Image (spheres, rainbow, N blue to C red):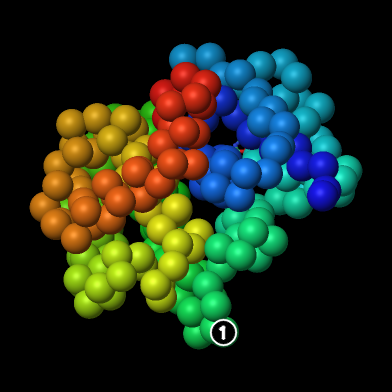
Amino acid sequence: MPKYKLIYFNLRARGEIIRLLFSLAGVPFEDYRVDLDEHFNPAAEYAEIKKAAPFGQLPVLEVDGENLAQSHAIERFLAREFGLDGETSLQKAKVDMWIEGADEILRRVSDNIEEHDAKKKAADKNRIMTVVAPAVLGALEKTLSLNKGGFIVGDKLTVADVAFFSVQDWLKSAYKEEGVSLVAGYKAVDQHLTKISKIPAVADWVKKRPETPF
Ligand SMILES: N[C@@H](CCC(=O)N[C@@H](CS)C(=O)NCC(=O)O)C(=O)O
């Protein structure tokens, strides 16, 4: 088995889907976390880590010493390795589609948390709440209502389920009260979130993971 080292900040954001995939597969990995201060400034060691990262950003996954960057490429790679990427070619494409769908929310919320201009921050947050999240969660609600197995793609767990669990779990702390109401209006989405949260490897990881506010 390859030796895996995930290098990311002490955040859930773009790292947590990857950590959940390792937990689900029962595969050991080094969970290397760069500390951040309360203004999201990384610890001094980040300067060297950034230089070594393929795109100068994190997460990076070392696989037997080789660097892989871009969170979704890492997720797809691990999903393939662990059999969580769907069965048919069309299913695999749908899994990709939902990874990108979850990213519509994740990317904007992530930028919004880091925005310093108060006016732009409020306007962007309002757009996320009223336009972006309803479009994505509405589409997910429809898909889950039609797909009676309770998973997003096909009748088995895939990284698409993990991605939505992770984004929603993250929203609940990133946007606190708004995060809860963002997902509350969607019955099938809410049931899906509960279903995934009860998978023993997911529940186990959530229980034992280090304190990670965002
Ligand atoms: N498209 C990249 C985006 C990576 C990204 O934005 N990483 C942020 C943290 S979530 C980062 O490294 N920020 C620090 C920097 O840019 O130096 C991915 O999905 O991995």
Viewer-proximal residue among 63 and 181: 63
Q: Is mark 1 within 8 Å of ligand 1?
A: no
SS of the residue at dot 1?
Answer: helix
- The quarter of the image holding the C terminus is top left
Residue drawn at x 15%, y 56% as measured from the top left: 186
Q: Amino acid at mark 1?
A: Ser
Q: Is residue 5 above or below residue 81?
A: above
Viewer-proximal residue among 68 and 208: 208
Rendered image quadrant of residue 8: top right
Residue drawn at x 44%, y 41% as measured from the top left: 200
Q: Is residue 175 left or right of residue 87?
A: left
Residue ID for mark 1:
89
Residue 37 visible in the current orientation:
yes
x, y percentage for residue 192?
A: 28, 55
x, y percentage for residue 16?
A: 52, 40
Q: Is residue 35 above or below residue 169?
A: above
Q: Is residue 185 left or right of residue 152?
A: left
Q: Residue furthest left?
A: 185
Q: Residue furthest front?
A: 200
Rendered image quadrant of residue 150: bottom left
x, y percentage for residue 212?
A: 47, 24
Q: How many marks?
A: 1
x, y percentage for residue 152?
A: 36, 67
Q: Is residue 8 left or right of residue 63?
A: left
Q: Quadrant of ligand 1?
A: top right
Residue drawn at x 46%, y 33% as measured from the top left: 204
Q: Is residue 173 above or below residue 133?
A: above
Viewer-proximal residue among 81 and 118: 81
Viewer-proximal residue among 62 and 83: 83
Residue drawn at x 15%, y 42% as measured from the top left: 181
Residue 55 visible in the current orientation:
no
Q: Residues within 10 Å of mark 1 (few under 14, many from 20)?
A: few
